[in-house]
Image (cartoon, rainbow, N blue to C red):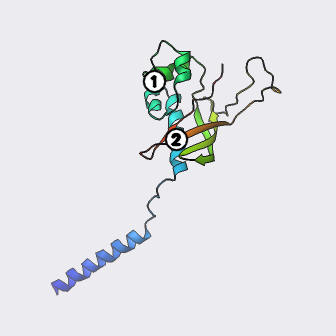
Amino acid sequence: MVGNKTLFWGMTVALVLTLATACSPASPTALTGSEQAIEALEAFFERLSKEDYAGAAELYGGSYETLVNWNPEIPESNTESLWQKGCQINGLQCLTVRSAKLVEESDGELVFTVEFNNPDGELFVQGPCCGADETQMPPASQFQVRLQKTPQGGFLVLDMPVYVP
């Protein structure tokens, strides 16, 4: 009789576990390449906006030539200082991502149309520059940003933030 009770409870536990597993929500599926790229894009700009320049540099795979030209006293290897100057002095708009839409994908490079948030949460709009009027240089709120897939499967941002002189 004791053996039958043990067998009964063992089968009951097995049945409950089977039902619980079958009824539980599905495990999250792996992110698609474009979803991973958006996460990297958002993380890069979030880090810049929070002044985590070393963290942002880890997610950047583009050229530092412009930042070095603007800041010749800083060696190219000092990416943290280059980003700091770029965001705080040189006119890069180190803002958070408002939205990102994939517009092109080719050979591991993804191109997104991106909108950014001003620090107050409003949409960032780049106005005319350098003496031009709105007919010569219409305001822009959407900007293209490229990302490159790494051999390890992650993504690096290839383009610097929007520049406003």
Q: Residue furthest right?
A: 135
Q: In the rendering, at what x and y percent does residue 35 appear?
A: 53, 49
Q: Is residue 87 visible?
A: no
| Label 2 CA crowd tier, 10 Å (few <14, some 14–19, many 20+) | many
Q: Residue furthest front?
A: 107
Q: In the rendering, at what x and y percent does residue 42 appear?
A: 54, 39
Closer to us: 71 or 55: 71
Closer to us: 105 or 36: 105
Q: Residue at x 59, y 29 (%)?
A: 161
The quadrant of the image that shows the N terminus is bottom left
Mark 2 to mark 1 CA distance (whole Å): 19 Å
Q: Residue at x 58, y 38 (%)?
A: 146
Mark 2 or mark 1, which is nearer to you?
2
State whether residue 38 is above or below residue 45: below
The residue type indicated by label 1 comes to Thr
The residue type indicated by label 2 comes to Gln
Closer to us: 26 or 20: 26
Identify the residue under disc 2. Answer: 148
Q: Is residue 116 left or right of residue 51?
A: right
Q: Is residue 47 visible?
A: yes
Residue 164: quadrant of the picture = top right
Q: In the rendering, at what x and y percent does residue 148 appear?
A: 52, 41
Identify the residue under disc 1. Answer: 79
